Image (spheres, rainbow, N blue to C red):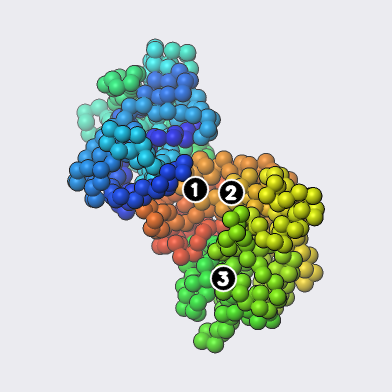
Amino acid sequence: MWKLAALMILATAAACLADETGVLVVTGNGAEGRPKYDAGGKVEFTDVWTGAQVVHYDGGDELPLHIGLKYIVHETADILHSEEKVDLRQAGEGTCESFRSRLTARYGPLPAKGLCGINGRRYFLIREPEGDWIDVVDPPPFFSSTAAARNATVTLADLSEFSLQIGEVQSTWQPGGPLRVQVTITDADGDTFPVVNCELSASAEGGDWQAPMQTEWGTMCVPTGYMTATLPEGDVPEQVTVAGRVIMRKEYKTESFSEGVERTIARGEGLVTPEQLRAHVTGWEPVRNAAGVIRETRALWVSPTDLESREATDDLIERAQRARLNVLVPDIFVRNRFMANNSLDLPATTHEDRGDPLAYFVEKAHAVGMEVHPWFCTTYRDPNFRAWFEQKYGVNVDVIDEDGEVVPLPADLHRPEYRDFMVELMVGVARDYDVDGLHHDYIRVMKDCYCDDCQAEFEAGSGKPLAEATEEEWIACHRQAVGDIVQRVAEGAREIKPEITLSAAVFSNMDSGARQGQDSPGWAREGWVDLVIPMDYAMQTLLVRTNERRFLEALDDDDQLVSGLSLYQKSGGEASPRPAAIVREQVELVRSMGIRGYCLFVGKYLDEEIIKTLRTNVNTERAVPYFR
């Protein structure tokens, strides 16, 4: 059985080409209240390896998994990194290694024996030479690449006793057709598992033909358990010999050793049809409507910059169309910026140079068959907006922290006048524009408020000071204010447009969302939203799977879940488009979980590599939104 293990300090194995995804500018996170490390250091990771295909494992919490790293130090610093001791004191190329991987249930279930993919890295420790760790830093995207995940696939088995063999064979035995074999190991417990990534080749007697055998991969970087080669284009040999070796490791800090495997296969053995061969790869069976068109929500969050000019809008819609997306979610209200006309005299809403941005966006998207669901950042209001609001409505909506200081960005959702404003604004867009949906974002308090009004209201209701509020009381208080907006927007918008689709972007960690007033399963249950979209932006697909499972368990109707996936990655504070392979892997993950759609964040990172992968490998046919 295939498994994934998340390791706290383990770097994944890879044979990747070095590129910008491997660059790490060392800037600390201020872990556990420590001062943030900012004394310099820049390193580029270029290769990573495990050195074995089978590793001894008897079910404990440690693995004798050899990890090697190759790197280039571009900017020196007087620090070391993590278990492998990446030394930044000397500029230029370097290598290092570690021999132990620590597993802990805190980061997911411990692995069982069998094929196991060790994917991603939690963080790097920043250490002083010969000293204790001083901070942590996030890893660069290199460690979550597809190549890394594939090369970090090993078989865990009890190597106290074992035997290797080449088992099942499958082939069409046609010229140029595939040859598949399964290398297996039977361990001390009598359990048999497939082995992949081994050094294996197929050849004909006399040496007229020889071909290396490669690991066969299904969706989400999951191996099928087979090694494959391509038969010669001419005459197919009467016999094919498959031979090679498997590298194994038993103990910590000991040399690996290898065992040979070989088998001669007669032509015609394991004969299968091409259809039978294709069936072995785990695929996605799409849902189709009566006309045979795929039903799947393929959405894209769109930033305000893509509405700033008609040229920017045209370019964004053209790229989304080539990626075969079908729902666009343009951000029309953030800080004090509103990208549409309205009757509320909002500041910064005149667009004499380009007309009405939202109206143009809707016109162009509808012309190519894409829906438009305007995106509203509910609490994300800057000081300029809050000053305008107080002048117009006579109500101060600053959020005040426990020290009496104004929090820079949020507006206070506990003020009924502000909630009325948000409801009127969103319902007004549903009324005034030919939109297909409305989308809530920052639909949360962002920060506890200790203003005089909040304190008086809490004390009147509970009989005690706000400073003594329990976590449960904060959650209940916030949930009431946030839910009021969600409910009334739904009621008002549906009165105008009964078929409108309402959605909400929520924290991927449901507990964190609840602390700020989010109750997305409850909103869906009440019918206040049609779609719940967790912002699941983790690079590691394992973490995305864990979060999405929680939402599937919490929602009464799984079809109301749309997974929010990221198109960008960060390294050293800089953002750039993710490798297209990771985007593909995560879309395939949510499909495999039965989730009926995804929403990608954000349009500016929808680059040509990602578009090509979506169109060629992921969205090979057009689709209508699942909810239609």
Gap between marks 1 and 3, in whole Å? 31 Å
Q: Is residue 624 visible?
A: no
Q: Residues within 10 Å of mark 3 (few under 14, many from 20)?
A: some
> What residue does disc 1 label?
538
> What residue does disc 3 label?
383
Contact flag, marks 2 and 3 (Cβ < 8 Å): no
Q: Residues within 10 Å of mark 2 (few under 14, many from 20)?
A: many
- Coordinates of residue 313 in the picture (x, y in percent): 50, 74
Name above or below for residue 57 compared with residue 365.
above
Q: Nearer the viewer, residue 305 or 514?
A: 514
- Coordinates of residue 355 in the picture (x, y in percent): 56, 85
Gap between marks 1 and 2, in whole Å? 9 Å
Q: Amino acid at mark 3?
A: Pro
> What residue does disc 2 label?
508
Q: Earlier in the sequence, mark 2 or mark 3?
A: 3
Q: Amino acid at mark 1?
A: Ala
- Quadrant of the rendered structure where residue 532 is? bottom right
